[in-house]
Image (cartoon, rainbow, N blue to C red):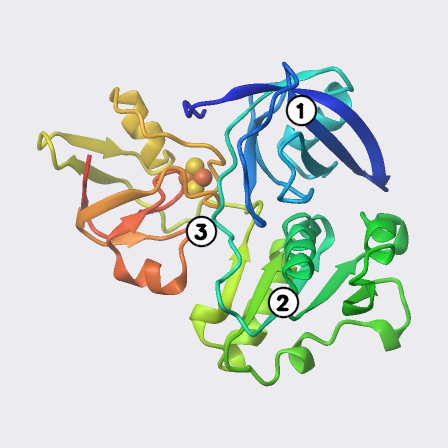
Amino acid sequence: MSNAQTFTVRVARKVIEAEDIATFELVDVNGGTLPAFSAGAHVDVHAPGGLTRQYSLCNDSAETHRYQIAVLNDRASRGGSRAMHERVKEGSLLEISPPKNHFPLAHGATKSLLMAGGIGVTPILCMAERLAVVGSDFEMHYSTRSPARTAFYDRIQGSDFASRVHFHHDDGDTTQALNINELLRAPQDNCHLYVCGPKGFMDAVLGAARANAWPESQLHYEFFSADVTASESDLGFDIKLASSGRMIKVAKDQTVTQALSAAGVEVQTSCEQGVCGTCLTRILEGVPDHKDMYLTPEEQAANDQFTPCCSRSKTAVLVLDL
Ligand code: FES
């Protein structure tokens, strides 16, 4: 559970945007302005039932009177999105964090390639609108299962950048299918790739980009959920707190944050799935077993930080900067 600073917003509007997708317009309870955000930002929403979920902001980033989020009612979810669909109505009050941006647009790109899969369109659409406003070159590819499940179709088609957006549907004919490998075949200098969507889609896009030698510095991505699975090889290990020298045991079936919490040491968490970076903690000694989707491959390889909500240790002891 997060203990980050939060504030209360009111749901001013809830609209069914596409099949299983609802948008929520959030406003200040007193009609005031909201903290500013930039394209790619998200807020942590404390959904009814106690789960905290990250939702990207998908309205114009110049607006300060509202935030718009879109939520997929994911049947496989742990309950956060279902609670948003079923229990949050117009007039409901929600606790949210101020916007955070782990997925910002790079400065000075000559071109941006925006790739969205399903509900991953939320930060990507915000980026497209921003790039259009500042007159920067971009191309957007938006893949969904079907037209009925394509959120923001009318908004995109009615925009002045509609001709730069390519829609792809799994149930469409082969001429409109997204050919990821072809699209990413030739990396261009200073062309930045942004991708957001389900894990399979992101793995395919990032895998193709890396196979085609796109520089890691030109790849930008945000996972919004991940399956952190326990594996047979997960073992127990010890955490040492650098400040006090105290040793804490992490059992085979326990996360590091659970073990720390049981010992009275709280690390701030949010997603608890290795996607948001809230729990990021510095490592002073030992080798972590990274299981997150938040750090880049280079950051993981440096082994000087990890996400204790899901990552573990390859060594018997991990010394943390706590
Ligand atoms: Fe989100 Fe650990 S709490 S990465």
Residue in the image at 79% along x and 28% along y = 14
The spot of residue 180 in percent (x, y) is 68, 74
Distance from Cα at disc 1 to Cα at disc 3: 29 Å
Looking at the picture, which amino acid does disc 2 mark? Ser
Which element carries disc 1, helix, strand or loop? strand
Looking at the picture, which amino acid does disc 1 mark? Val
Give the residue number, with chain letter if any, for mark 3. Answer: 294
Looking at the picture, which amino acid does disc 3 mark? Tyr
* Residue 245: numbered disc: none
Q: Which of marks 1 and 2 is in front?
A: 2
Asked whether 314 or 123 is in front, the reply is 123
Residue in the image at 81% along x and 60% along y = 160
Q: Is mark 1 within 8 Å of ligand 1?
A: no
First in sequence: mark 1 vs mark 3: 1
Give the residue number, with chain letter if any, for mark 1. Answer: 27
The spot of residue 79 in percent (x, y) is 65, 29
The spot of residue 12 in percent (x, y) is 75, 22
First in sequence: mark 1 vs mark 2: 1
Residue in the image at 44% along x and 51% along y = 294
Q: Residues within 10 Å of mark 1 (few under 14, many from 20)?
A: many
Q: Is mark 3 within 8 Å of ligand 1?
A: yes
Is 13 located above or below residue 173 in the figure?
above
Give the residue number, with chain letter if any, for mark 2. Answer: 136
The spot of residue 143 in percent (x, y) is 76, 61
